[in-house]
Image (spheres, coloured by chain):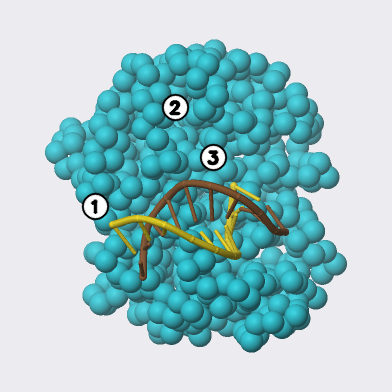
Chain colours: A cyan, B brown, C yellow
Amino acid sequence: PKTARFAFPEWAYKPESSPGSRQIQLWHFILELLRKEEYHDVIAWQGDYGEFVIKDPDEVARLWGARKCKPQMNYDKLSRALRYYYNKRILHKTKGKRFTYKFNFNKLVLVNYPFIDMGSTGSSVPQSAPPVPTGAGTHFRFPPSTPSEVLSPNEDLRSPGGMFSSVARRMARGSVSDCSDGTSANSEIEEGNTGAGEERGERGYRSIIHPRLTTHEALFRMYGGPGNPGEPLSPFPASPLPGPGGASLLAPPLSPALSMTPTSHLPYTPSPTLSPMLGSHFSFNPEDMKRYLQAHTQSVYNYGLSPRAFLQYPNIVIPQPHRPDKAGLTERGAAERAERATTPPHMSPFKFKLQPPPLGRKQREGQSQSKPRQSSLSSGSGSGSMSSTSGLGSSLSFGSDLSSASGSGLISVEPISDIDSEEEVEVTDISDEDPDERDEEFELFAPRHPRASDHHHLANGSARTQHQPHTDEDLDEDVFKAPAPPPPGLMPFFTSQHTLSSVHRMLPTLKSEPIEPGESNTPPSQPPMAGAPQTKCIPLKLRFKRRWSEDQRMEASQEESDDKKVRPEEEREREMQSNGQMEMEEDGMGSGDGDSPPMLAYEGSLATPLASHRRATAELHRATAQLSLENKDC
DNA sequence: CGCGGAATAC
DNA sequence: GTATTCCGCG
């Protein structure tokens, strides 16, 4: 069997799946308009990365109103909605420029679109469009390509990667629809809008995918090849695309955000009978799956997704909790070796560690000190409630096994550490259920890219000299909450013999540490202190400092303030207190693990954290680019 | 124009 | 929770 059938949770197919809302969201809609050439006169990317200008506010409002069936919509109202995004950090206003806003892509979704194809390369960028990263360098790129490699932090942000290509228009699905009542004069329905719901299932996906094939071409045409850093609009600060075969570096313009097809070239076949919205089944070839998993893994790591996210992935073999390290290591080593032979460094397995979630306000109040969440291993019991997750620490290792996946479609995840390892047990529970608002903030993830840069410096010994204050600005750690767990029915996908129970036990507490790829760096599974200090850990002190300055900066800079209500200082203080000792990393807990953030592993594989971040951003772009905002019938 | 509170709708 | 609607303020 070349392909395996997998079921993905419906949220995966829903653009609207952003947490909290089932309906299309404004920002999403905006992105869609931005993506379509036909609306360039109405709204378009302009200025900085992620910055866009609403050229015709009334029209945009009208379109939006049409989409939402709110004929009374106007720019005033729409703008109010946009303003609500400020605190959410999805958007911010570009001061001094009329009708100009800027997306904080870093915060967008991703989590919802783990399937992005990381493999694609990054590429050209439309004007201010996507702030994204050049995909070039990501570790996960499937066909390996040269990483753009370490760009300065600033570059990182500015790096191109625009994925929104006008090409998209081909796939344009009605972003706007006319309300059934036709109140609005618009029927801006576009080509794609074909009747409302009918075939959306099929058509939608298809459209998402097909365009990709032509994208490169289109992109080049439109924006010039990757090799044209010089383009006026090109965000490339420097040519990040050194790699061989420039083409390979290009990202598929329309990559599939949602498409689960990780690769731009890999077709996946949607089940004809199922509507994606309903939770359909798709067939993927092994390659796709690999990428998919890789991407997701990465997402998990980067965005602090709950391990339970893995539940959604088919064919993942869940590691046994008690498995001896030795086995794992050995295997890993072998796999790694094997992999190395045939795959790029980025494929190396890595470990990642989930970060502890922030306490909810309430919780915060109650306990100021440490938050020893009961990390009951068994807590995972509640099937439905991943919430209880507490942590354990197990690690997942992907990569090497992927190769094998091609044949069977199986991907194994091996535990790198045991759950029992008490030291590491600090866990994080990222489950959604938690009452707290982990979704918004806090650095769930340890290695924030920005910090990564610091980290980097530290590693080199040059430590902060180069600290660049602005770097972080856009790199926000906030992330949307992880997608809801897949319906029970999907569970069967785990092919491993491990039963769900084991899965449950494990997932909640997954914790991993980066595995150093072979020679590249630190020895595998090392105690926190060991290899981490210089290269991996970012002292809280630093972080705080950063934050502090960040805040100030924000006020001063135009990009500014995001926090405000979302993240009152109070929280920060709390955070500090709870962390007490400045040295611990976000990861966690006093157990001191300190162990390095995965970055190391990444670095080893050429990709820097920044790159990762960029990639993530790219994902976002792609994802958004691919979204089909179908209009629900009004 | 732009902001953000408040109430309200869904 | 995400808008929509209103609205006063600068």
Q: Give, as a three-letter code, the residue at label 2.
A: Asp
- The kind of residue tagged 1 is Ser
Residue at image point 36% right, 32% down = A569
Viewer can see residue A175: no
Above or below for A98 versus A604 = below
Task: Write down the quadrant of residue A457 in the picture.
Answer: top left
Q: Are marks 1 and 2 on the same chain?
A: yes
Q: Is residue A10 visible?
A: yes
* Mark carried by residue A587: 2
Q: Secondary structure at mark 1?
A: loop
Disc 3 chain ID: A
**Front residue of this view, candidates A632 and A522:** A632
Q: Which residue is mark 3?
A: A439
Left or right? Give the position of A433 relative to A601.
right
Residue at position x 75%, y 61% in the image: A277
Q: How far apart are the alpha carbons under marks 1 and 2?
A: 30 Å
Q: Position of residue A570 (x, y in %)?
A: 39, 29
How packed is label 1: few (under 14 Cα within 10 Å), some, or many (20 or more)?
A: some
Say whether residue A338 is left or right of residue A383: left
Q: Say whether marks 2 and 3 touch (CB < 8 Å).
A: no
Q: Residue at x 74, y 45 (%)?
A: A486
